[in-house]
Amino acid sequence: MTLVTETNIPTKLLKKGKVRDMYDLEDSLLMIATDRISAFDVVFPNGIPYKGQCLTQISLFWFNMMKDIIENHVKTAELTQYPKELQLEQLKGRSIIIKKTDVLPVECIVRGYLAGSGWRSYQKTGEVCGIALPEGMQESEKFDTPLFTPSTKAEEGHDENISFEKMSELIGSELANQVKQKSIEIYKRGNEHANSKGMILADTKFEFGLLDNKLILIDELLTPDSSRFWPMNEWKPGSTPNSLDKEYLRQYLLKSDWNQKPPAPTLPQEVVQETSRRYLEIYKTLTGRELNV
């Protein structure tokens, strides 16, 4: 196992994100999921073994499952099909060559359950992202119909929730309606599959782009970094189930003396190992197979 927290690829670096590095291949892009981990918008000095491979392989699993709903940006994830100079061991299992698209300037969030920031907002205002909800709902309660709550995509700082009407102004009402419909359709199928594996997909976020004026699904898909998964046997309205994502790391950090501002502290080895174990576990649970890279 090779831990990859930094990439050095013999082509143009387009963007370095918290977790992903993007390289320009002229007619396409190379998207690499590193083993970096962030919490509270801060990247940690330690990498998490197998994290990049888990995220990439989970996304590929879902992209394949959803391809009859919507086309996606994957060209190939087979290292043997990469240009010769990119057939590098560090890219194995953690990278995808993707189509270039005109990325829509919105995050497409679907909430099936009242949780996280949605629950906090509901307690204060009775609404989630401007959508009024019935009185007396409990934390983690399931919505009758999933909520679509878009947000802006901030280059720096936090994304900002916007109304569907505002999203329609940004990208046009016809496209906004298509994005909303596809987002809810993907969420429902994802949750059905998660349920069949003993999990609940509480909420998630999607990104879309346009390729030759056609809407396609991009970025990552239904990973524990972009979604909130719960064990089904722990779910009960009025309580907070343990999330099968970075929540373990967040809880550890909240109990530490770190002030949630840069620089991030070095994580203890046992926290690194347990976080890695959780990524591997959710990969196996969702896909039904062991990670093979």
Image: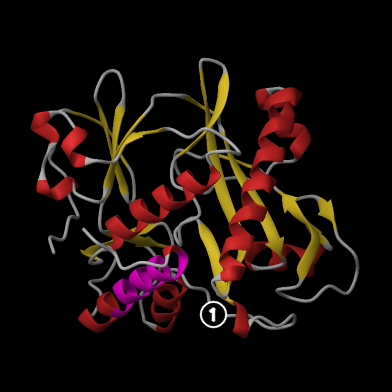
The 10 Å Cα crowd at callout 1, few under 14, some 14 to 19, many 20 or more, is some
Residue 249 in percent (x, y) is at 39, 74
- Residue at 36% x, 81% y: name it: 257
- Residue at 15% x, 28% y: name it: 83
**Up/down of 153 relative to 110, above or below:** above
Magenta stretch: give its range: 274-286
Residue 70 in percent (x, y) is at 57, 35
Q: Is residue 102 visible?
A: yes
Looking at the image, residue 285 sits to the left or right of residue 140; the answer is left
Give amino acid for label 1. Answer: Asn
Which residue is denoted by mark 1 in the rendering?
242
Which quarter of the image is occupied by the N terminus?
bottom left
Looking at the image, residue 211 sits to the left or right of residue 271; the answer is right
- Residue at 64% x, 62% y: name it: 192
Looking at the image, residue 36 sits to the left or right of residue 246; the answer is left
Question: Dividing the picture into quarters, in which one does residue 166 lie?
Answer: top right
**Up/down of 107 relative to 116, above or below:** above
**Up/down of 21 relative to 84, above or below:** below
